[in-house]
Amino acid sequence: MPYNKPPTTTINQEGYELKWERGHSLLFCHFDENLLFTYSEKVPEGKDDRMEVNIYLDYHPDNSIFVNGKKATAFQMNDRVEIHSGKRKITLEFTPGEGQFFGHISRHNRPSRKVPKNVFESHDWRIAIRTISRPSDSKILIKCS
């Protein structure tokens, strides 16, 4: 399958999904087709609940994530996050509304992946945005190229 074929896109109950050759996918949870995420009115209280923005990428040897050209596990909103998948490169740029946010990259499972509770394995990378503070009507836009 040629690498110049554009990814296919779908919108499902989880969000907006890009799929490309070799069955790889990138899932933007709770985003619309314009890659716009609208935060809920209430800022979550719990530490884990503050990861309101979640993007999932298949964990596979073909896939790597870089921040400003280097491997990293955290990023700020003005950083460039690149996903390399074989010969394909996807760049994510985050434009938040008002508020303070911080990005994290970790292993995790997308919500639709069914893994038994007592099994500690993950099948995806998670690119998450943690809310530090924000007004109730904040939004975040992702430019994907």
Image (cartoon, rainbow, N blue to C red):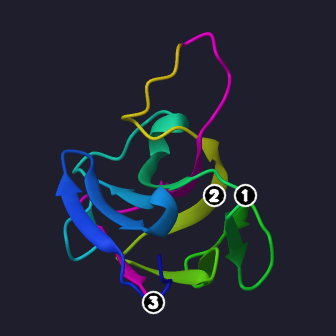
Residue type highlighted by circle 2:
His
Residue position for label 1:
61
Does residue 121 lie above or below 93 as drawn?
Answer: above
Magenta highlight range = 117-145
Q: What is the CA distance from the residue labelled 1 to the residue labelled 3?
A: 20 Å
Q: Earlier in the sequence, mark 2 or mark 3?
A: 3
Q: What is the CA distance from the residue labelled 2 to the residue labelled 3?
A: 30 Å
Does residue 114 lie above or below 68 as drawn?
Answer: above
Q: What is the CA distance from the residue labelled 1 to the residue labelled 2?
A: 20 Å
Who's the residue at 64% across and 16% down the image?
Answer: 119
Q: Earlier in the sequence, mark 1 or mark 3?
A: 3
Circle 1 residues within 10 Å: few <14, some 14–19, many ≥20: few
Who's the residue at 55% across and 52% down the image?
Answer: 58
Residue position for label 2:
104
Most distant residue in the front direction? 1
Q: Position of residue 3 (x, y in %)?
A: 50, 83
Q: Which image quarter holds the C terminus?
A: bottom left
Labels 1 and 3 touching (C-beta < 8 A): no
Q: Is 124 colored magenta in this rendering?
A: yes
Q: Position of residue 51 (x, y in %)?
A: 48, 48
Does residue 9 lie above or below 2 as drawn?
Answer: above
Q: Nearer the viewer, residue 98 or 33?
A: 33
Q: Nearer the viewer, residue 137 or 119?
A: 119
Residue 69 in view (yes/no): yes
Residue position for label 3:
4
Question: Under tag 2, what secondary structure?
Answer: strand
Does 82 sit left or right of 98 as displayed?
right
Residue type highlighted by circle 3:
Asn
